């Protein structure tokens, strides 16, 4: 990567995603910070890396650092709260979503069910 004569957003996203998917979140963040241009894929790769590695505080800070996230990004963060068994935070986040899809609903229902809150899941 370092010896490439030209790097575009696609090549940057490839290296970022490689680190992110390997669990090298700090390296992924370093690449993200060095990127001269970021797109939706860049932002989602880092957000997903934080969520998948249970680094929810960093995921939340990243999410709050910009506006106009895609629904897939909202669902990613929602899934992170459910994964951490924080259904109160998940519900608050779910309620703040302007748009919800079947993934959003399934995620919040699953969160309640996995935490024994069957009445809330209904």
Image: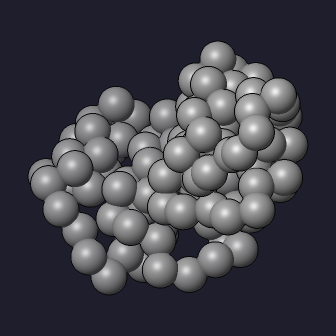
Q: Which one is nearer the viewer's eye here, 23 or 18?
A: 18
Q: Which one is nearer the viewer's eye here, 119 or 55?
A: 55
Report x, y in % for residue 112.
32, 44
Compared with 101, 66 (above or below) is below
Compared with 4, 79 (above or below) is below
Compared with 65, 22 (above or below) is above
Question: In the image, is 87 to the left or to the right of 118?
Answer: right
The chosen color scheme is: one colour
- Point 66% across, 37% down: residue: 16
Report x, y in % for residue 5.
76, 39
Instruction: Determine which quarter of the picture holds residue 65.
Output: bottom right
Report x, y in % for residue 75.
37, 54
Quarter of the picture containing the N terminus is: top right
- Point 67% across, 64% down: residue: 37
- Point 71% across, 45% down: residue: 6
- Point 62% across, 25% down: residue: 18
Question: In the image, is 101 to the left or to the right of 27?
Answer: left
Regarding residue 55, the answer to whether it shows in the image is: no
Q: Residue furthest top?
A: 22
Q: Which one is nearer the viewer's eye here, 98 or 121?
A: 98
Tally of numbered tags: 0
Question: In the image, is 90 to the left or to the right of 18?
Answer: left
Instruction: Determine which quarter of the picture holds residue 13.
Output: top right
Regarding residue 61, the answer to whether it shows in the image is: yes
Report x, y in % for residue 12.
66, 43
């Amino acid at each position: 990567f370092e010896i490439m004569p030209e790097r575009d957003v696609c090549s940057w996203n490839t290296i970022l995603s490689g680190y992110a998917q390997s669990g090298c979140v700090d390296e992924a963040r370093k690449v993200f910070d060095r990127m001269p241009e970021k797109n939706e894929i860049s932002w989602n790769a880092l957000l997903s890396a934080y969520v998948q590695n249970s680094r929810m505080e960093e995921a939340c800070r990243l999410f709050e650092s910009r506006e106009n996230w895609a629904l897939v990004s909202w669902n990613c963060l929602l899934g992170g709260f459910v994964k951490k068994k924080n259904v109160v935070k998940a519900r608050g986040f779910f309620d703040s979503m302007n748009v919800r899809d079947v993934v959003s609903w399934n995620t919040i229902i699953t969160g309640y069910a996995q935490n024994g809150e069957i009445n809330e899941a209904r």
